[in-house]
Amino acid sequence: MTRRVLLLGCGAQGKAALHDLVSGDDATHVVLGDSDRGVDAIARRYPVTRVTAKVIDATDESAIAALMREADVVVEALPGTFALPMARLAARCGVSLVSSMYLRDPQEQDARKIAATEQAIGDIDRAAREKGIVILPEFGLDPGLDLILGARALTELDEVEEFRAYGAGIPGPNARDNALGYKFSWSPIGVMRSYRRPARIITGGEPAEIDAAALFEPGRHHIVELPAIGAPLECYPNGDAVHYAELFGVRGKVREMVRYTGRLSGHSAFWNVMVKSGFLDCTPVAVNGVEVSPIEFIAALLASQAQFQYGDADEDLTWIRVDVRGKRGGKGVRVVYDLVDRRDFTTGFTSMQRTVGFTLARGARLILDGALGRTGLLTPIEVPYELVFPALERHGIRVERQELALPPLR
């Protein structure tokens, strides 16, 4: 029996998800929906029995709903602002969905908007449970694979004392050829927005917040040396460790917990000046009578330049690390999981496409197979390591584990 997948969005990650879904030997038919008319040409690369293209606007919810009702699962690979609306629509239509995006806006500070989002997420969960479907957001690289590794690492400790997670997408050695030492492997505006969201951490056992304007200040980052990267990485706090401490069930137990983003040397100093100078502000300013948002201008300016884009010969790297420290059998222990991946020049897919797109495709297959064993709104933490990483390893995406004995931290 043919299994029907609706893939919404055919950007970089969507293309990789499509490739993986179609490359399998299972009877999967993908309906590829995108507003770009070039979607037809992409679909023609594959047998007509496997892929059908639909030119469709993601803001047309009635048209999207009609496609959803014909699908067995939806793979949502649209820009981040669509994550919550598409999850809500899928729940309403009674079809399972997997997405790499957050349902919550990590940079939102308005209490009323946050409350409305939480209400919507609760409604999605209830509807999904009632209809026996799965809504699986944050199922990409970071968030996604890092959370699965985190859950795995925590099973190896009796008590957790410190939990640090790292994520990075950076140019490979042959592509570090511009003033920023950075190229975009995902949405430029998404990168800029991530630079202006506050970080929530746990320190001394208590939650604390680092203001977005202070993320890149001197003393905020530390250096991680990893031979596979080929250069030291500046790692600065970015993300909500308090939220994930609750999901992992370690809030009130862990003394130190932080999520970090890694960049090449000099990144923090440059963006500290940019942030402090207002270049990432969202409030529009008047320029010759035209209202311009600084953050959107910066994203568009950088995205318009070839030097900040990956060329066909440029390598990119992705890195995930989960580093947990605590006790097992009364003895101090440190467990570290590292994932370092590189562009595949055979397929042409960047590492970011591979680690996000292939993970999305894996999530869709797990839902189609009924392998998750539960319904409702799930997190990657609830998806077992064994269901994901062996499948990714067949693509050459591998994880290395280290274990070190430590003196107890307290």
Image (cartoon, helix red, strand yellow):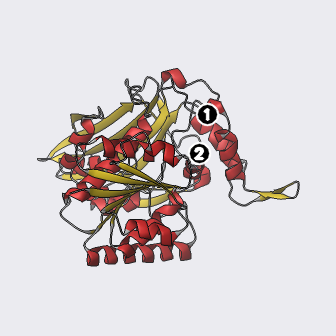
Q: Position of residue 219 (x, y in %)?
A: 54, 41
Q: Position of residue 137 (x, y in %)?
A: 37, 59
Tag 2: amino acid: Pro
Q: Using the image, determine if residue 268 lies above or below residue 90.
A: above
Q: Position of residue 316 (x, y in %)?
A: 47, 30
Q: Is residue 117 left or right of residue 303?
A: left
Q: Do the numbered discs 2 and 1 sit on residues whose CB atoms are within 8 Å? A: yes
Q: Position of residue 98 (x, y in %)?
A: 35, 58
Q: Nearer the viewer, residue 287 or 115?
A: 287
Mark 2 surroundings: few (<14), some (14-19) or many (≥20) residues within 10 A:
some
Give the alpha-carbon distance from disc 2 to disc 1, as whole Å.
10 Å
Residue 277 at least partly seen: yes
Quadrant location of the N terminus in the rendered image? bottom left
Q: Is residue 367 left or right of residue 229?
A: left
Q: Quadrant of residue 325?
A: top left
Q: Residue at x 58, y 44 (%)?
A: 216
Tag 1: amino acid: Phe
Look at mark 2 in the image and give the residue it sits on. 188
Mark 1 surroundings: few (<14), some (14-19) or many (≥20) residues within 10 A:
many
Q: Nearer the viewer, residue 55 or 133?
A: 55
Q: Using the image, determine if residue 240 lies above or below residue 150.
A: below
Residue 163 at least partly seen: no
Look at mark 1 in the image and give the residue it sits on. 308
| Residue 137 circle label | none
Q: Residue at x 27, y 46 (%)?
A: 149
Q: Nearer the viewer, residue 195 or 241?
A: 195
* Dot 1: element: helix
Dot placed on the residue nearer the N-terminal end, 2 or 1 = 2
State the residue lying farthest toward the left: 329
Q: Is residue 215 left or right of residue 164?
A: right
